[in-house]
Image: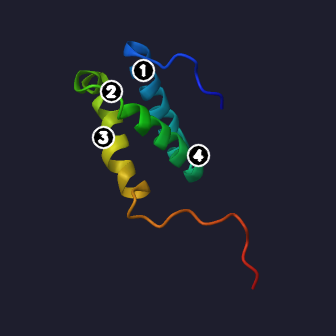
């Protein structure tokens, strides 16, 4: 994915964070954990650039999922994903 020339600001940044959280949740609901993890990381990186007032504009349901529920499953304390290579028996 190409980097944007102009970083998002204001309302566009808030909308992008919400969009990414919703995409991550849809991957979560589809049991696509690898895609969910990547999208969640992108959403969290953008979320951490927001001011307190901007964070308050994001719906609480999305904030809770991003910060707490998904942390339970994707946090640093969890075992990292395994390689896709099959082991030989």
Along the polypeptide, which appears first: circle 2 or circle 3?
Answer: 2
Name the disc covering residue 13, or none.
1
Asked if residue 47 lies left or right of residue 54, the reply is right
Residue 84 location, x and y as percent? 69, 63
Are there few (<14), some (14-19), or many (20+) residues within 10 Å of tag 2? Answer: some
Are there few (<14), some (14-19), or many (20+) residues within 10 Å of tag 3? Answer: few
Along the polypeptide, which appears first: circle 1 or circle 4?
Answer: 1
Query: Which picture quadrant has residue 88?
Result: bottom right
Asked if residue 67 lies left or right of residue 18, the reply is left
Give the residue pinned by disc 4. 35
Asked if residue 56 lies left or right of residue 66, the reply is left
Kindly indicate whether the residue at mark 2 contacts the one at mark 1 (C-beta within 8 angstroms).
yes
Q: Residue at x 65, y 65 (%)?
A: 83
Along the polypeptide, which appears first: circle 4 or circle 2?
Answer: 4
Give the residue pinned by disc 2. 50
Q: Which of marks 2 and 3 is in front?
A: 2
Q: Nearer the viewer, mark 1 or mark 4?
A: 1
Q: Nearer the viewer, mark 4 or mark 2?
A: 2
């Amino acid at each position: 994915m190409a980097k944007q020339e102009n970083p998002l600001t204001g309302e566009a940044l808030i909308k992008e964070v919400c969009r990414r959280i919703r995409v991550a949740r849809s991957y979560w609901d589809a049991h696509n954990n690898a895609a969910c993890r990547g999208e969640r990381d992108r959403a969290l990186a953008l979320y951490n650039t927001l001011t307190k007032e901007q964070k308050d504009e994001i719906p609480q349901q999305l904030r809770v999922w991003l910060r707490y529920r998904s942390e339970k499953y994707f946090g640093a304390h969890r075992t990292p994903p395994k390689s896709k290579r099959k082991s030989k028996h």
